[in-house]
Image: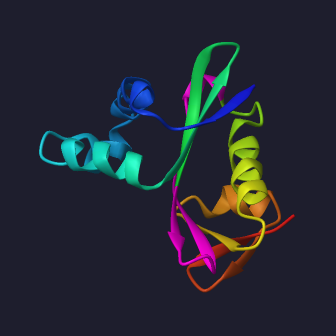
Amino acid sequence: MDILRYKPEHEDAVISAIKRDPDWDMLTNESAVGNYRKRLLESITYVCYDNGIFGGYLRAIPDDGIAVYISELFVVPELRNRTIARTLIRKLKMDFRHATVYALSDEDAYYDKLGYKKIGSVFEIHG
């Protein structure tokens, strides 16, 4: 499994993967997708390739070295349950070990399953 910092050449893989999921339409509809492409480059974004196949991505927003907020975490449906999401989170934690990492999520059950602590409306990512 390869975790890479996002580059423009990853754009097609990310956008086409999330376009297949109707829950992500707010980022991929015609009026939003151009702006979202810019956000992928401006944010802390990682992509995962599993045996050369795009498996998912994580986009996070830094807060002046104090905290990093995971904004999006997406794994291609057919590759779920293969530790891709956990590996992406681990990479972010490793690269920003001096900052607290939080997840902004509507997938509370996933973060609960991993044992992360819910603090108000975010999860604190530890370990």
Judge whether 24 appears above or below 56 on screen. Answer: below
Which residue is drawn at the image coordinates 71% and 27% (left, top)? 2
Does the magenta portion include 68? yes
Q: Quadrant of residue 29?
A: top left
| Residue ranking furthest to the top | 52
Which residue is drawn at the image coordinates 19% and 48% (left, top)? 32
Judge whether 67 appears above or below 115 on screen. Answer: below
| Residue ranking furthest to the left | 31
Which residue is drawn at the image coordinates 80% and 57% (left, top)? 114
Q: Which residues are magenta?
A: 60-79
State which quarter of the image contains the N terminus: top right
Does the magenta portion include 62? yes
Q: Position of residue 76 (x, y in %)?
A: 55, 29
Q: Is residue 35 left or right of residue 14?
A: left
Judge whether 14 appears above or below 59 on screen. Answer: above
Judge whether 108 appears above or below 89 on screen. Answer: below
